[in-house]
């Protein structure tokens, strides 16, 4: 049974959380001292890793190559990211977000879940394996991006290109995204491990209106602000249609065994009941995201003074795109529902299509079985990540893609990711380390498994 990590192991993560490696929307803006501080901490904390693995740097992104004993083939590409999102209101936190506080139960700080714990857990597992003389039969790559929260254009993208030039094709690509949840899957009492097989697409649609302007005492029928507000309202009030996709059907089919009999029956006739099932799923935001391309107006701007008619107004609407839809179909939908040629509509900034291949892949059961060993009694299912991760840059580089970490979270814990009071329990951190140790053991020179140890021994 996994035991919580000891103080020294927890402190290594806490020190990483004290490095405020924040990614912002200002392109090219990087907090060099914070990333340099984190780099120095990693190199000091994991000396064997940095003595024995090859390391290439892409800015502050780090690509490690753990050379296998066999000359050909790559077992795995293990992804994680070093950057974190900004903190909205630090005064609402129990502990300052970059203080890296460790108490008897939790390690507190921005990045504790997303995603420095995975960076450190992978390194803890590799360092322990090297100390025990374990070597992989085939090569393992570790790729730690520095700009995942701003789409990975200068980190993950360049590391993935490097792997393509090397001709890499791994058995397994493993990244963040899925986890084990308690009390989140409606009607399921057992903890549910969602091993995600890909992610939704991403697009931000920019709406803009230009007008003559003038004095507010003599307005026309509609100002630029009113026109842009009407366009946003039409897009929000007319979302893209609900739809059952094969990946969501597979997820529900795997969950069916753990559901009450009435729901098992409904899912047993899912081919006929799909419209009803999707309507039920649409009642809650976290399940609606599985059956619809979601619409989120996020920014609106216009005007300079209360008594001046605005000459320009604009808005941004963010879409997370379900497989079967596309960036182009989102734009076409927006133009159709806005029905106003005076509103200019275009995609802005980074966009990506949904993952094309969502089959489990040959290494899926390996990940699932390790998860079952770490947290007994779970129900394992599939799914799709509603957000964007670095792994989309590597999609063609592995036979199996899994977005998953074996940490057990409830709804309250999930709300801390990108939110207030982000923290990871010592037990969950031990699970992360043990998961990676067992995974490495599967790729080791001999079939012997890693000894049953807790994070306290790491």
Image (cartoon, rainbow, N blue to C red):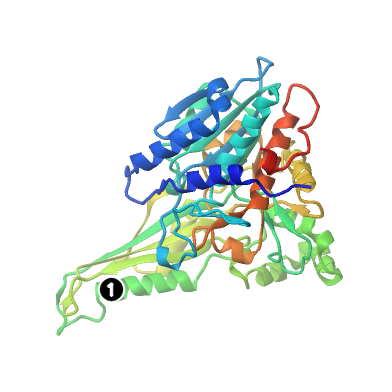
Residue 198's spot in the image, x, y percent? 61, 46
Q: Which quadrant of the view contains residue 155?
A: top left
- Residue depicted at 39% across the width and 36% down the height: 36
Secondary structure found at label 1: helix
| Foreground pick, 293 / 453 | 453
According to the picture, the residue beneath numbered tag 1 turns out to be 225
Q: Which quadrant of the view contains residue 450?
A: top right
Please state if 438 lies on the left or on the right of 31 as rendered.
right
Q: Which quadrant of the view contains residue 29?
A: top left
- Tell me the quadrant of the picture where the C terminus can be found: top right
- Residue depicted at 70% across the width and 26% down the height: 132
Q: Is residue 139 above or below residue 11?
A: above
Q: Is residue 183 above or below residue 11?
A: below
Q: Is residue 51 above or below residue 378?
A: above
Q: Is residue 182 visible?
A: yes
Q: Is residue 242 visible?
A: no
Residue at far bottom of view: 217
Residue 383's spot in the image, x, y percent? 67, 53
Residue 335's spot in the image, x, y percent? 41, 63
| Foreground pick, 222 / 145 | 145
């Amino acid at each position: 049974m996994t035991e919580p990590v000891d103080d020294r192991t927890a402190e290594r993560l806490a020190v990483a959380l004290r490095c405020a490696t924040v990614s912002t929307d200002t392109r090219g803006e990087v907090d060099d001292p914070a990333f340099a501080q984190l780099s120095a901490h990693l190199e000091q904390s994991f000396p064997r890793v940095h003595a024995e693995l090859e390391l290439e740097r892409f800015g502050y992104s780090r690509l490690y190559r753990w050379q296998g004993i066999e000359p050909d083939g790559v077992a795995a590409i293990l992804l994680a990211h070093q950057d974190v999102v900004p903190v909205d209101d630090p005064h609402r936190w129990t502990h300052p977000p970059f203080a890296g506080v460790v108490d008897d139960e939790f390690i507190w700080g921005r990045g504790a879940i997303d995603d420095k714990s995975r960076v450190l857990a992978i390194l803890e597992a590799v360092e322990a394996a090297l100390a025990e003389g374990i070597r992989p039969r085939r090569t393992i790559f570790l790729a730690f991006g520095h700009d995942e929260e701003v789409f990975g254009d200068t980190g993950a993208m360049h590391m993935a290109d490097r792997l393509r030039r090397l001709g890499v094709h791994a058995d397994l690509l493993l990244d963040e995204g899925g986890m084990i949840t308690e009390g989140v899957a409606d009607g399921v009492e057992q903890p549910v491990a969602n091993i995600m097989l890909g992610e939704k697409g991403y697009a931000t649609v920019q709406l803009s209106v230009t007008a003559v302007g003038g004095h507010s005492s003599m307005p026309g029928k509609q100002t630029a602000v009113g026109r842009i507000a009407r366009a946003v309202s039409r897009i929000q009030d007319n979302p893209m249609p609900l739809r059952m996709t094969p990946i969501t059907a597979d997820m529900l089919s795997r969950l069916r065994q753990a559901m009450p009999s009435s729901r098992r029956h409904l899912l047993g006739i899912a081919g006929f009941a799909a419209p009803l099932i999707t309507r039920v799923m649409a009642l809650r935001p976290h399940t609606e995201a599985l059956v619809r391309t979601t619409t989120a107006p996020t920014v609106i701007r216009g005007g300079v003074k209360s008594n001046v008619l605005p000459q320009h107004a604009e808005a941004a609407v963010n879409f997370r795109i379900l497989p079967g839809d596309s960036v182009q179909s989102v734009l076409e939908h927006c133009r159709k529902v806005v029905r106003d040629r005076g509103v200019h509509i275009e995609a802005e900034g980074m966009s990506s299509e949904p993952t094309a291949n969502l089959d489990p892949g040959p290494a899926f059961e390996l990940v699932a079985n390790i998860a079952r060993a770490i947290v007994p009694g779970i129900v394992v299912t599939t799914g799709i990540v509603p957000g964007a991760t670095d792994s989309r840059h590597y999609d063609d580089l592995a036979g199996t893609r899994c977005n998953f970490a074996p940490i057990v979270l409830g709804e309250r814990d999930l709300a801390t990711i990108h939110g207030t009071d982000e923290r990871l329990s010592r037990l969950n951190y031990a699970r992360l380390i043990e998961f990676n140790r067992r995974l490495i053991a599967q790729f080791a020179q001999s079939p012997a498994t890693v000894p049953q140890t807790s994070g306290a021994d790491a």
